Amino acid sequence: MAKKLRLDFTPVKPVPKTGKIRLDFRPLVFMRDRTHSYLWVRDGRSYGYFLTIDSGSVELVKVDIEITYERDEKNKIIGETKVYRVYETKEKYFDLEPKNYDFRKALEKYHSSLLSRSNKAEREMRALLGLEPLELTDEEGDVTPQSKPERAPKGEPKAAAGYSLAALCAELKMEPGEARKILRSKKIEKPGGKWEWASPEAAAHIRTALGG
């Protein structure tokens, strides 16, 4: 059974004064009913997009944007209030409450957890964290993160490593991303779960395709 992911909402220490003005005042971490965290990703026309573990797995969800207007005596709009509203039924809903919590720290906890996550959520998290994107489509099943492999006892020989695309690209002085694009354009598929071969000789046709 997967462990529950909890966020520590201890107030963030104030940033030391540096003489520079920081203008990013948008709250990025929200709570629903004080128990479920939501991480803001972006706004659409009538929805906000959030990463959340509300359902027990990491998902990218759309949350309704509700706007109420403040009017003066002449019915002229003088202000507005925007809230993100999660509906359970037409009558029952929760407004998300902003929390003073470090967004990146929360995002890293989401991504490093052993909870399963949708492909959309995995793609968004990797983009926000600056990680290399995975080749995922929205139609595929959930991504299940792999737990960290156990270290082999001392004295046991390590298993021989394969020959990776990264190693080949280093020899050809080529970026791996560029190499993957060339291989996909030539309709050359991965030999398995990743771009890796048993030996340099087994990857000879890949070297040729890349002009090596």
Image: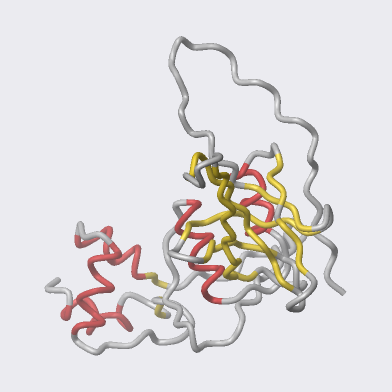
> Which residue appears farthest toward the right when viewing the image?
1
Image x and y of residue 130, in percent: 44, 52
Q: Viewed as shown, does residue 127 lie left or right of 204?
A: right
Q: Could you say which is closer to the camera, residue 84 or residue 154?
A: 84
* Residue furthest left in the image: 211
Residue 17 relative to residue 92: left or right: left
Q: How has the structure been colored for display? A: secondary structure
Which of the 4 quarters of the picture holds residue 205?
Answer: bottom left
Q: Residue at x 64, y 39 (%)?
A: 102
Residue at image coords 24%, 80%: 183
Quarter of the image with the N terminus in it: bottom right
Q: Is residue 184 left or right of residue 137?
A: left
Q: Quadrant of the rendered structure where residue 206 is?
A: bottom left
131 is higher (above) or lower (below) than 157: above
Count of numbered circles on the image? 0
Question: Is the residue 35 above or below the residue 206 in the image?
Answer: above
Say which of 35 and 64 sits in front.
Answer: 64
Please tell me in which quadrant of the rendered image residue 186 appears.
bottom left
Q: Which of these two is toward me, 197 or 144? A: 144
**Measured from the top left, where is residue 106 in percent x and y?**
67, 48
What is the x, y in percent for residue 104? Answer: 59, 44
Write the residue at 45% across / 73% down.
162
**Residue 142 point in image, percent of width and height:** 61, 81
**Given the current orientation, which residue lies at the most extreme front position?**
74
Image quadrant containing the C terminus: bottom left
Q: Is residue 178 left or right of residue 3?
A: left
